[in-house]
Image: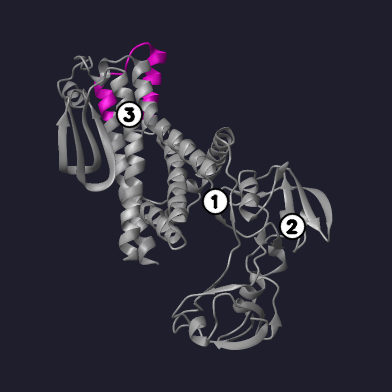
Amino acid sequence: MTQLVTIFFGILGLGIMVLIHELGHFLAAKANGVDVEVFSLGWGRRLVGYQHRGTTYQISWFPLGGYCKMKGDSALREAWRNEDLEYPSEPGSFFAASPWRRIAIIVAGPLANLCFAVIVLSLIWWAGFRIDSPGNRIVLASDYALDAVSEPTPAQAAGLQSGDRVTRIAGNDIANFQDLRRHISPAPARDLPITVERDGMLLSAIITPELDPDTGAGRIWVYPWIEPIIDVRLGGAASIAGLRSGDRVVAVDSMAVRHSIDVVQRLQDGAAPVDFTVEREGQPLTFTVVPDTGTEDLGLGFRLPQSRSPRLSPAAALTRGIDDTWNTMALTFGGFARLFDGNARNQVAGPLRITYFVGRAATDGFENSFGAGLVRFFRLLCLISIVLFIMNLLPLPALDGGHLALYVTELIRGKPLRPAVVYRIQTLGMSLLLVLAITVTFSDILFFVGR
């Protein structure tokens, strides 16, 4: 049942993003006097549809994607075949519109994705939502051997210590670890004023996040300090051994623990089975946990503190929505280098994986509450919409940015390129797009096989 819900919300989410994008093209075309022949969600043969005022609205058999076919697309092919030097200029044709109008139509699609993200993020901040996040207390990664770090880390260089509470970064209050990430991630190689609380005293320093080459984001090499209160999965090894959700771990294999990182480090260093000493209703109890056969999964996690975001005024919510959108754009631009570092196969998701991530975000959230599921679902849609805005404006054939480059060139030259040239560029672009689609789909298949 869970898998069906994941698939449903994944397809629904991708359908919403495509609908918003193509609706931007559609409305701009109508506003500029260009006729739209087909408005399709999905590709390939039509499943269902109807015709209204000269436009066929349809859902096609392959549900991942869509298109908005404007009058003149087919005539361009005929002009190329007949070696015409003029574009099809019948009334309502896309190519009969001025370059500025064509530019407006092309830009409207990506712009609709961007506006969608800003509006939805603003509505989320205005309505308020539940936050499942560790607090603002930190653990230095350099104090543990979980990740390979190059010392000194940014946190060490700034004089931070495990147990510090980060209270401000660059003039912004930090209430939890999400806030910390939100201000660190977009700022690699930037000097940021940071204030921490230690032993009741406020200390100030300058911290310079380093660039994470895998994500394009800034990082300072700290973990969240999570109290070692566990949630136990029914039927898992921890549950079978007698551990319960709400138990507080005080020792693992007789080694005292203060937070979740102590537990994780001890589990990584030790061998199975594992002795857990927990505090339950004020009493210490010890249980021996044997991992599931063939895995190291103990079937337990750590309980995150829950809080509510403040309900912001419409103006403040809009400001926060714009801020979140801008930060995501900055991270996306910073991550473009990943496409050229030799690891693109592992880091670029195709439509199948995007569908899975969107659906998974929704189902994971619904396990907590209906509202939490909707918030996670739409926040991920906003993130992907922002990425689509940027990617579609890249000056590559077949993408909106490729068409935009053609019409800007036409404005500069004072005359359009020959139909044959434009058609060849579009054909090349579609071929490249097909190769890219096959590549990322193969990458998605490898991702699912490896799960």
Identify which amino acid the numbered label 1 is placed on. Thr
* Disc number lying in front (1 or 2): 2
What element does badge 3 sit on? helix
Judge by depth and name the residue closer to the eye, 91 or 118.
Answer: 118
The CA span between labels 3 and 2 is 48 Å
Residue 418 picture location, percent across and down: 27, 18
Q: Residue at x 54, y 46 (%)?
A: 128
Q: Residue under label 3, please give it.
A: 25
Instruction: Verify whether residue 318 appears in magenta.
Output: no
Q: On screen, 168 above or below 361?
A: above
Local packing at callout 3 (Cα closer than 10 Å; few below 14, some 14-19, many 20+) is many
> Which mark is in front, 3 or 2?
2
Q: Is residue 273 visible?
A: no
327 with respect to 8 (left or right): right
Residue 420 is a magenta residue: yes
User: Does the image show residue 401?
Assistant: yes
Q: Position of residue 310 (x, y in %)?
A: 60, 46
- Vertical order, 31 against 136 (above or below): above
- Disc 2: which residue: 165
Residue 420, position as x, y percentages in the image: 24, 23
> Where does label 1 land, which residue?
215
What secondary structure is the stretch in magenta mostly built from? helix
Q: Which residues are magenta?
A: 402-424
Q: Secondary structure at mark 2?
A: strand
